[in-house]
Image (cartoon, rainbow, N blue to C red):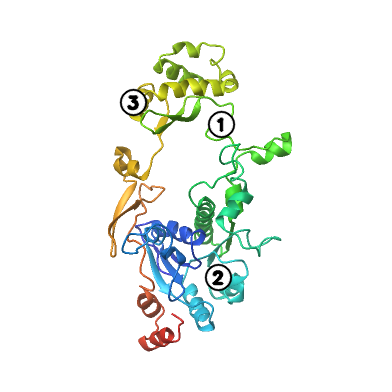
């Protein structure tokens, strides 16, 4: 383990990332964004399936891999063979954090469970991301992010009441689990380094990461019998707060549900009398007449382009925003001012735009240093330079299909 630096906040932290797809690798991405040295272990040959996922350019390069594997170094290692497992143990001995998202029990079968690893590296923090967690009757079941979203409750409350629940549009369950995994890793490192503690396991279940976001749905049912359901684009009895159509085919989200804001909103629409009407003057009244009020607002927005609606809202200090696409993000002045999109040179693709690091730290900000590496690009650097293997040893491992 190397000495801490004064640049990025996680500079000097070595992370070994195992597993594939999203839940583990996004955790590694987050840690790498803030300066951790992330060594991604991939099987020889094809590597992480994320190298193939998502939309591709004509040349065959995926546009997802450069993001999910940014700031990482790639080594290849066959973890199904004893020699590969032994080399993995040596690598993990040098690490502060190990991230894995295999099915529970897999690492133990390979002799890479926490009990074994911590004997030689008692300061190791092991982040274990899985569908159902490391304990419980479901732990051995296969669990993808979509299943975690269903079990965690978010699928049930997403969409419209007269249609089957849709997916959110991104891999939300995986990303949430990875984010909580990164939080757990940083908390465990702080406990180890600032408080003199030892390493520990960070156990993250995808369904639990989703459950953590489910607001008051549990006591709503347990204490009142209410089951929160799908309500489309609205919050029931909170009005106006909806998505409204415009004449140019766009949609604008407007939130004018607070009494003072609604007064400004009604005046901006040319209907100051709404703020005095018994049907709309109070929060409860607007909630009772939500559908009627939304139709009146939609009639007004349908006669105007999105930018005109937004300008009226800005002048009236009413919260409103357009539904952004990637095209909007790349041309928006606020995105540009806050450098939300950063362009990084990719050796295969060229200039590559991607989302920047979140959150932003004022003194030691994270940054995107490079895009996802080629498979096994850093075998020599890691195995020879960091672990002291000879060229002959590495060549032998390559010939036997271990690396």
Query: Residue sitting at 55 percent across and 35 percent down?
Result: 232
Q: Which residue is mark 3?
A: 308
Q: Earlier in the sequence, mark 2 or mark 3?
A: 2
Q: Which quadrant would the C terminus be assigned to in this image?
A: bottom left
Q: Quick check: can you spot residue 33?
A: yes
| Residue 122: mark | 2
Q: Nearer the viewer, residue 342 or 168?
A: 168
- Residue 24, above or below 258: below
Q: Position of residue 144 (x, y in %)?
A: 57, 58
Q: Quadrant of the N terminus?
A: bottom left
Residue positioned 50% across, 80% down in the render: 84
On residue 2, the disc is: none
Position of 372 with respect to 189 (left or right) is: left
Mark 2, other Cα within 10 Å: few <14 / some 14–19 / many ≥20 = some
Q: In whole angstroms, how far apart are the C-alphas of marks 3 and 1?
A: 25 Å
Q: State which tag comes first along the sequence, 3 or 1.
A: 1
Above/below status of 273 relative to 141 = above
Choose the circle earlier in sequence order: 2 or 1: 2
- Circle nearer the viewer, 3 or 1: 3
**Judging from the image, what secondary structure is the residue with disc 2 in?**
loop
Q: Is residue 25 left or right of residue 331?
A: right
The answer to whether the residues at label 2 and label 1 have Cβ atoms under 8 Å apart is no
Give the quadrant of residue 348.
bottom left
Q: Which residue is mark 1?
A: 235
Helix, strand or loop under label 1 = loop
Q: Is residue 83 above or below residue 60?
A: below
Relative to residue 106, is residue 245 depicted above or below?
A: above
- The CA distance from mark 2 to mark 3 is 61 Å
Could you say which is closer to the camera, residue 183 or residue 147?
A: 147
């Amino acid at each position: 383990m190397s000495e801490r630096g004064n640049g990025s906040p996680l500079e000097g932290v070595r992370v070994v990332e195992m597993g594939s797809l999203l839940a583990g690798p996004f955790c590694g991405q987050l840690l790498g964004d803030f300066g951790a040295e992330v060594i991604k272990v991939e099987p020889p040959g094809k590597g992480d399936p994320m190298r193939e996922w998502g939309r591709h350019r004509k040349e065959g390069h995926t546009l997802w891999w450069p993001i999910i594997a940014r700031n990482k170094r790639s080594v290849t290692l066959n973890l199904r063979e004893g020699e590969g497992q032994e080399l993995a143990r040596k690598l993990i001995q040098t690490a502060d954090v190990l991230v894995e998202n295999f099915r529970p029990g897999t690492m133990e079968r390979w002799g890479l469970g926490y009990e074994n690893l911590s004997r030689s590296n008692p300061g190791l923090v092991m982040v274990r991301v899985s569908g159902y967690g490391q304990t419980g009757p479901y732990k051995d079941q296969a669990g993808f992010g979509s299943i975690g979203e269903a079990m965690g409750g978010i699928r049930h409350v997403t969409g419209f009441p007269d249609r089957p629940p849709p997916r959110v549009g991104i891999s939300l369950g995986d990303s949430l689990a990875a984010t909580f995994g990164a939080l757990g890793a940083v908390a465990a490192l702080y406990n180890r380094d600032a408080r003199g503690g030892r390493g520990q396991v960070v156990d993250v279940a995808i369904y639990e990461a989703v459950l953590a976001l489910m607001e008051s749905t549990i006591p709503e049912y347990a204490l009142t019998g209410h089951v929160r359901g799908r309500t489309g684009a609205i919050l029931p009895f909170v009005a106006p707060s909806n998505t409204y159509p415009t004449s140019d085919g766009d949609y604008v989200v407007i939130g004018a549900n607070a009494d003072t804001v609604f007064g400004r909103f009604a005046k901006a629409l040319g209907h100051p009398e709404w703020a005095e009407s018994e049907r709309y003057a109070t929060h409860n009244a607007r909630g009772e007449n939500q559908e009627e009020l939304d139709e009146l607002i939609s009639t007004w927005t349908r006669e105007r382009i999105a930018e005109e609606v937004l300008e009226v809202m800005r002048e009236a200090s009413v919260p409103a925003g357009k539904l952004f696409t990637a095209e909007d993000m790349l041309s928006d002045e606020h995105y540009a001012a806050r450098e939300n999109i950063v362009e990084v040179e990719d050796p295969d693709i060229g200039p590559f735009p991607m989302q920047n690091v979140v959150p932003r730290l004022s003194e030691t900000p994270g940054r995107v240093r490079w895009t996802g590496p080629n498979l096994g690009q850093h075998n020599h650097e890691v195995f020879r330079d960091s672990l002291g293997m000879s060229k002959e040893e590495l060549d032998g491992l390559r010939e036997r299909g271990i690396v």
